[in-house]
Amino acid sequence: MSDGPLLKNLSLNQITTEQWNLREAVEGCVRKEIPWISLWRHKIEEIGLAESKRIVTDAGLKVSSLCRGGMFPAATAKERQVKIDDNKRAIEEAAELGTDTLVLVCGPGPDRDIDAARSSVENGIEALVPFAESHGVKLAIEPLHPMYAADRSVIVTLDQANTIAEQYTPQQVGVVVDVFHVWWDPDLYNQITRASGRIHGFHVSDWIVPVPDMFKGRGMMGDGVIEIRRIRKAVEAAGYHGPIEVEIINQSLWDQPGDDVLKKIKESYLKHV
């Protein structure tokens, strides 16, 4: 294998071209010869599951994952059940779209009790495993950067994600390694090794200095400080050789023509991933 990544593994995570609807994103991938796409549920909802599947299938694209499930913690048992039911719909959507990976962004706490919120995450995953397994879908826990603990996920390290995932088989529950969220972790490479055999996704972008926006502040690969290639090689050494999703949430990219963004993605992917 060459030192750089293979284009056959390149996947467009749909949030990177948020300015496009699903059809436009699929057509863009075809024009730019990007073989994989990761779909977001809000984009699927715009046109419906059946039409989304038809568009992707007719284009010959492969779906690397569905974003997202999770968001488990809630203030009441009734609200928690609503979230479980929504996750079951997400599992059904993933299976219908032909991907075996549902990305879990696990959710923030409804109050100041972060330990209870983390217990809710574990309980939520436990409730979903049999349903996901029956549909051939793996649950992939994506730890987020600690700065997102208050509003997006109380699972903020790969160690936490591994600890939950290890309660199950790798075909039931695994992890997503997103460089934007884990690059800072002094135990990162030990945790990647620990996750061997249960890494179900790998996401790339970059950490810009200074971060221009807490949510929409990710950079194109090579524009920041992350050792992306080193992390990619560690993930491969841990047994992951699947699609590499470019997931960049950035308003400046959303303001550009999508084809220009895809051109830059391919260039940066080959140079920096």
Image (tube, helix red, strand yellow):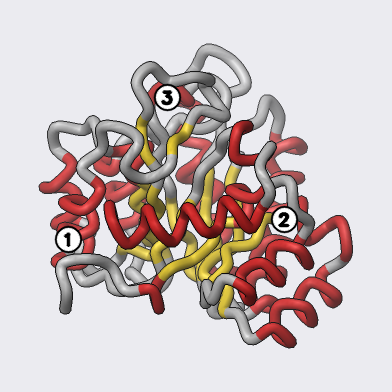
Q: Give, as a three-letter code, the residue at label 2.
A: Arg
Task: Identify the image quadrant of residue 175.
Answer: bottom left
Give residue 233's mark. 1
Sequence-wise first label, 1 or 3: 3
Say left or right for 264 vs 270: right
How much space separates mark 3 and mark 2, taking CA atoms?
28 Å
Q: Is residue 237 visible?
A: yes
Report which residue position mark 2 lands on.
41
x 55%, y 48%: residue: 124
Residue depicted at 43% across the width and 51% down the height: 141
Q: Amino acid at mark 3?
A: Asp
Q: Nearer the viewer, residue 179 or 161?
A: 179
Tell whether 114 sits left or right of 52: left
Of tags 3 and 2, which is closer to the observer? Answer: 2
Residue 189 coordinates in the image, percent (x, y): 13, 47
Residue 115 marker? 3
The earlier-in-sequence mark between 1 and 2 is 2
Q: Amino acid at mark 1?
A: Lys
User: As rendered, which of 177 and 133 lies closer to the eye?
Assistant: 177
Question: Is the residue 261 above or below the residue 25 in the image?
Answer: above
Q: Are marks 3 and 2 in contact (CB under 8 Å)?
A: no
Q: Position of residue 127 (x, y in %)?
A: 57, 56
Q: Are marks 1 and 3 in contact (CB under 8 Å)?
A: no
Which element is circle 3 on? helix
